[in-house]
């Protein structure tokens, strides 16, 4: 495929664009973690620091792909418990959602080094649900509710 961004500026289109995304049907699907990112900031509610691991997962299901007209890709956010010094809290009952993700990928073994980048390329089963937009309930977002072992 050849793509030239400059030429695209001069192309006239006669077709309209979709304005709504067809959500992935709710259910469990095999997926691959394609990319990760860590976001952080300060909560406006309580002025506390927060951190989140974002995983971009791609579902490989030809039936779903033909049903929604695209390859399903969903971003899954995992909130992280962080320490005052900025480190990851590995204490009892802390970062349980991260522990479940690591368990689903086979990367949650005591004594074995783990880096967040180790998640890229891992195959997992994801449980997809829907979340309506709070400002427009007609808009439905895909949401990964759980990471499961394949």
Image (cartoon, rainbow, N blue to C red):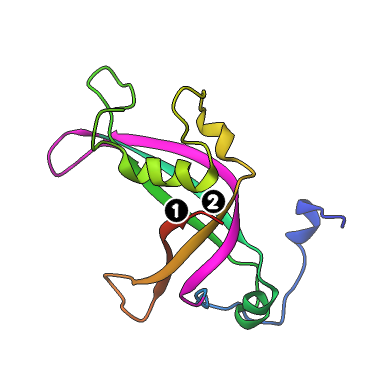
| Label disc, if present, on residue 62 of the rendered structure | none
| Dot 2 or dot 1, earlier in sequence | 2
What residue range appears in magenta?
25-49
Q: Quadrant of the N terminus?
A: bottom right
What residue is pinned by disc 2? 56
Q: Secondary structure at mark 1?
A: strand
Mark 1 sits on what residue?
Answer: 76
Measured as percent of width and height from the top left, residue 137 is found at: 31, 78
- Judging depth in this view, the residue of 49 and 20 nearest the camera is 49
Give yes or no for residue 34 being in the magenta stretch: yes
Q: Residue at x 46, y 36 (%)?
A: 108
Residue 97: percent from left, percent from top: 35, 46
Relative image position of residue 93 (x, y in whole percent)? 23, 38
Between residues 32 and 104, which one lies in front from this camera angle?
104
Q: Determine the residue positioned at 46% across, 43% down.
A: 103
129 in relation to 87, above or below? below
């Amino acid at each position: 495929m050849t793509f030239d961004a400059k030429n695209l500026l001069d192309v006239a289109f006669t077709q309209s664009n979709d304005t709504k995304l067809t959500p992935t049907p709710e259910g469990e699907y095999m997926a691959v973690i394609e990319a990760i990112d860590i976001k952080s900031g300060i909560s406006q509610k309580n002025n506390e620091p927060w951190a989140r691991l974002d995983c971009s997962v791609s579902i490989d299901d030809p039936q779903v792909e033909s049903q929604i007209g695209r390859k399903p890709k969903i971003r899954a956010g995992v909130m992280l418990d962080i320490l005052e010094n900025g480190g990851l809290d590995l204490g009892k009952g802390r970062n349980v959602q991260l522990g479940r993700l690591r368990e689903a990928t086979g990367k949650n073994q005591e004594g074995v080094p783990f880096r967040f980048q180790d998640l890229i390329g891992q195959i997992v089963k994801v449980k997809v649900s829907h979340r309506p937009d709070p400002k427009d309930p007609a808009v439905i977002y895909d949401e990964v509710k759980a990471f499961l072992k394949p």
